[in-house]
Amino acid sequence: MTTRIWVPCDSAALAVGADEVAAAIAAQALQRGLDILVVRNGTRGLLWLETLVEVETPEGRFGFGPVDAADVPALFDAAWSPDHPLALGLVEQIPYLARQQRLTFARVGIVAPDSLDDYLAHDGYRGLRNALAMAPAEIVAAVTASGLRGRGGAAFPTGIKWNTVLKAPGSEKYIVCNADEGDSGTFADRIIMESDPFVLVEGMTIAGLAVGATRGYVYVRSEYPHAIARLEAAIALARRHGYLGVDVLGSGRAFELEVRKGAGAYICGEETALLESVEGKRGIVRAKPPLPALAGLFGKPTVINNVLSLATVPIILDKGAAYYQDYGMGRSRGTLPVQLAGNIKQGGLIELAFGATLREILYDYGGGSASGRPIKAVQVGGPLGAYLPESQWDTPLDYEAFAALWAVLGHGGIVVHDDRADMAKLARYAMEFCAIESCGKCTPCRIGSTRGVEVIDKIRASSQPPQLTQHIVLLRDLCDTMLNGSLCAMGGMTPYPVLSALNHFPQDFGQADTSKHAA
Amino acid sequence: MSSATASPVSTAAAKAAAPSATALTTIDAILADLFARLGNRQDQLLPVLHGLQDSAGYIPPERVPEIAQHFNLSRAEVHGVITFYHYFRSEPPPRCVIQLCRAEACQSMGADGLLEHAERALGCSLHGRSADGTFGLEPVYCLGQCASAPALTINEAVFARVTPARFDALVADIANVDNNSREAV
Ligand SMILES: Cc1cc2nc3c(=O)[nH]c(=O)nc-3n(C[C@H](O)[C@H](O)[C@H](O)COP(=O)(O)O)c2cc1C
Ligand code: SF4
Ligand code: FES
C-alpha cells in the first residue's frame, strides 16, 4: 500500500529547504524500494517547525520537524518512528495548532494548494453553491450579519461596504483584492494565496455575485512570486472547471479574475493608491470622497477588500452568519489570524477568536523570545502600529480595546523585540520608512518624515538636557502635524510607533524613565 | 556551516543562480510581443514594464519613447511610473541580486548584523556591487518570512533564518555554479 508523506510547498518552507527535503525523501524511498507518494501540502503555520514533514498513519498525519534534507536518511533508518528526536506526534494534536480556532485557515496546511479535488473534498465551493441560490441582497445581508470587519487594517464592516456597492448605480462594477501585504510581521495573506488559493478565488466570486460585478483583480506585491504563481494556477483550474468564466457553474452569471503584480511600493497597499496602480499610474493616494465603493477602479463602483476579508466569506456562506458571529468579543466578531514574528521562539500563524491577550500569544503560543532574553516591546499592526510595553500585554485582541490604548490591531501582525532593542532607533526607522515610501502628495508626510529622521538623529546624539528637551518638543510637534495634516494613514499613523516608543521607553531617548513605576 | 546541511543549500543556490531562459532575445522582439499580447489600454502599462524587465532584466531608458507612444502617453508620464516603483530598474542588474530584508521583524533577529556581514563578504555597501560585478546588494522591506527572520532573496529564490555562515555558504555555492558553468563552456 502506498504511504503518503506530506512536505509543504509554501515559501515559508521553501525558504528553509523544503524542496531539498522532498527530493531527499523521494530518493530514499526509491533507493529502499518503498511505496511512498510525496504530496506537497501548504504550511500548517507552525513556522519554527518548518520543514514540517507529515507521515500518513492509521491514527492520522504524524509530524516530524524541523526536518533538514540531511536528516532524511536517518528518519528512514528509524522507519519514521515516534521515538525519533524530531517526532512531534499527531500534527492535529500539537497544542499550538489544536488550541486554535481555524475558520479562515480551516484547510490551510491540510490540502495540496494545486488540487481543486482536495479543495472540494474539504468543503470547498460550498459557500459559492449556497450563494448562487441567494439574491444579491441576501448575500450582502449574510456578510453584514456575520460581523466581519475588514482585516486589511481599518476594520470597516465588510457587509456595509458591499451594500454601498450593491446599491451604487452602474452596470460595470469591480471586485479588487488587496494582496499588497506590505506590513512587516504579516504573512497571513501570503499563506492563504500559497497554501489555499481557491478560498480567495471563491470569496471573490461570491463578492461578485453579491454586488453585481463580473470582473475581479487581485493586486499582489512583486515580493511574492510564489503566491502569484499559485494564484494564477488556481484561477486557471477554476476556470477550466466552470467555477469562473461567462457562466459560473451553469448559473448564467459571469465572473472573471485576473492577477496584477505590484512593483515594490508600500503605499500601493492603501486602497486608492492601489487602484491608481492597477490603472497603470503612479501609486498616488486619491482624495476621498468619492469612496471607491462609488467611484473606484476606472471610476466604477468597486469593492476593495483585503485577502483575509475575502477568504473568510466562503465559510460564512457555507456555515451561516451566526456560526461566524458566535466567535469573538464585543464588536470584534469571528477570528483574527494573528501572525507572530520577530524575536520569538515559536513564530507562526495563530487564528483565534478575538479576545485572547497579547501575553497568551507571546508566552503560551510563542514560548517567549527566540534569544531567551526578556521581551521588551511588541509592535502590533505593522510599521504604522504602536509599540506596546509589558504593562499593556494583558489587553485583549479586540479592535476597540487597542484603540483605547492609542494602538491598532491592523492586519494582526505582532513583531517581538527583546531587551537589546533600541527604541529610539526603531522610532527613527519608522520615520525613515515613511520617507522612503511616502507617495509625496502631502507635505506633512513627505517633508515631515525626513525632518523626523533628522530630529531623532539629533536626539540620539545629544547629551545636553536643555537641547534634548528642545528636540523632543520638536519631535512631538512634528508628529502632531503628521497626525492631523496627512491625507492618509501613511503620514497620519507613522507617529504611532514614534510616539509610543518615546512615551513608553523614554530612557532610550536619553530621558529619565517615568513609566516603569506606573506599569 | 556543517557539511551535513551543505547539500540543500547548494541545490537551492543553484536554483537561485540559474539564469532565466528567454526565447525572445532582442528587446525589439520582446516589446513587439508584449504590445501585441497586452494591447494599449493604460492599465496594461505595468504588465508591459514587468514583461520587459522579466525578459530583458531591466527597462532600457531609450525605450521609454516607444512605450509612451504605444500607450498614447507622454514620455514624462511613463518615466514617472517607472521611477515611482522601487521594483523597476533602468540599468542591467548584476548576475546575482541579493535583497536583504531591512524591516522590523528581521531587524529584531539581527538584520543589521547580517547586512554588515554581507557588506564585508562582498566588499560593497547596500545599493552597491561586488568588485567583480557578480553580486548586487539591495534593501527590501519584508518578504513575508518574518517568523523565520532574517530573510533575503537571491534573484527570485527566498531564504530564511539566514545566519552569516549560511550567507557565506549561499554565496560560495553561487560562485561554484559560476565556475562550473565557465568550465563547461
Ligand atoms: C499606507 C497604507 C498601507 C496599506 N496597506 C494595506 C495592505 O497591504 N493590505 C491591505 O489589505 N490593506 C492595506 N491598507 C488598508 C487599505 O487602504 C484598505 O483599508 C483595505 O484594503 C480595505 O480592505 P478591508 O476592508 O478588507 O480591510 C493600507 C492602508 C494604508 C494607509
Ligand atoms: S500621507 Fe503620505 S502617503 Fe498618504 S497621501 Fe500624504 S504623502 Fe501620500
Ligand atoms: S520583516 Fe523581514 S521578512 Fe518580514
Image: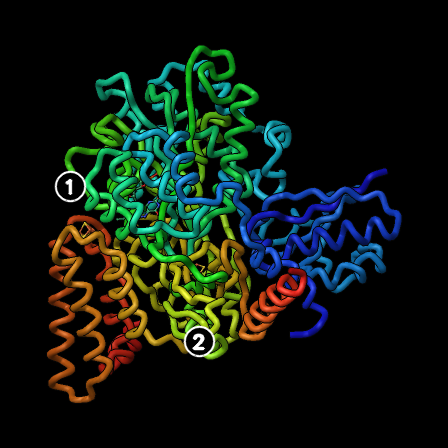
Q: Examine the image and state in which quarter residue A50 appears.
A: bottom right
Instruction: Tell me the chain of label 2.
Output: B
| Mark 1, other Cα within 10 Å: few <14 / some 14–19 / many ≥20 | few
Callout 2 touching callout 1 (CB < 8 Å): no
Estimate the x, y position of residue A328 in percent, counting from the top left.
41, 42
**Residue at 49% in and 24% down:** A127
Give left or right: position of B163 versus B85.
right
Label 2 – label 1 distance at C-alpha: 42 Å
In the picture of the structure, the residue carrying the numbered disc 2 is: B119
Estimate the x, y position of residue A80 in percent, counting from the top left.
80, 55
Q: What element carries label 2?
A: helix
In the picture of the structure, the residue carrying the numbered disc 1 is: A287
Q: In the displayed structure, would residue A15 be above or below residue A210?
A: below
Q: How many badges with numbers are in the image?
A: 2
**Residue at 42% in and 59% down:** B93
Q: Is mark 1 on a helix, strand or loop?
A: loop
**Residue at 61% in and 54% down:** A95
Quadrant in the picture for the N terminus of chain A: top right
